[in-house]
Image: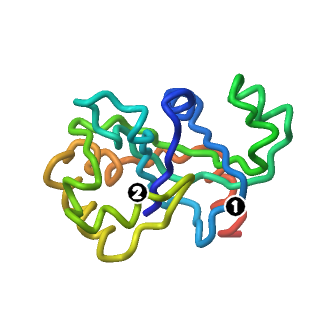
Amino acid sequence: MFLFKASGQTYLRVVKQSLHAFPYRPREVEVGQVVLLSKNREDCTSSEAQIQFVAKILAVRPATTLELDAHFPGVSAGERFGVMVELYWMERLDRPFNLSQVLGPDHKFYNTVQDYSLLKDADELKVFGFLVKNNPRVVLSYLNRDDLPEKLVEYHDSDAG
């Protein structure tokens, strides 16, 4: 499970486009991994939780300056980033949350994350347990879906033959 952070200026664009941009390719990234989409703490209102959406990773690829600036205008995306992460199964959480609610003091490890972080195994289990208990509709939606994006269907079809 990954934590992807975004500024308040780009958070809704990431959600609407199911795209996120980074300076470098995330390590240990795999197609189908769950992503917690977190808004930077300083961009949240006092009553707003940072993690409001979850998604899954579809692809990680190089991106052009033009593409980045088109998808994320006004933030110098083409100068700052070089990698695009495509997402699928974007879901709004019924009960958004902050990592501090789930991890307690251990959440501080992720406070300094600028762009993304792979969650530690123990933290991933705690987050998953929290999602099951507090966002069961989203978890059940993920378990019951079979509407893979066409890009994944093509990948699986070519892999099978």
Question: x, y percentage for residue 100?
Answer: 24, 55
Identify the image quadrant of the C terminus: bottom right
Mark 1 → mark 2, Cα distance in angstroms: 20 Å
Give the quadrant of residue 99: bottom left
Camera-side residue: 27 or 23?
Answer: 23
Identify the image quadrant of the N terminus: bottom left
Name the residue at 44% across, 48% down: 146
Which of marks 2 and 1 precedes in the sequence?
A: 1
Camera-side residue: 149 or 14?
Answer: 14
Camera-side residue: 2 or 141?
Answer: 2
Residue 101 is left or right of residue 108, and the answer is: left
Instruction: Check the image and report above or below for 7 versus 112.
Output: above
Instruction: Check the image and report above or below for 82 versus 74.
Output: below
Question: x, y percentage for residue 113?
Answer: 49, 58
Question: x, y percentage for residue 86?
Answer: 63, 45
How many residues crowd mark 1 within 10 Å: few (<14), some (14–19), many (20+)? Answer: some
Question: x, y percentage for residue 25?
Answer: 70, 61
Give the quadrant of residue 72: top right
Residue 62 is left or right of residue 46, and the answer is: right
Instruction: Check the image and report above or below for 71 versus 101.
Output: above
Instruction: Check the image and report above or below for 69 versus 22.
Output: above
Circle 2 sits in a helix, a strand or a loop, which is it?
loop
Residue type (three-letter) at the residue carrying disc 1: Arg
Tally the numbered discs: 2
Camera-side residue: 47 or 92?
Answer: 47
Circle 1 sits in a helix, a strand or a loop, which is it?
loop
Residue type (three-letter) at the residue carrying disc 2: Asn
Q: Which residue is mark 2?
A: 111
Q: Which residue is mark 1?
A: 25
Name the residue at 59% across, 66% down: 29
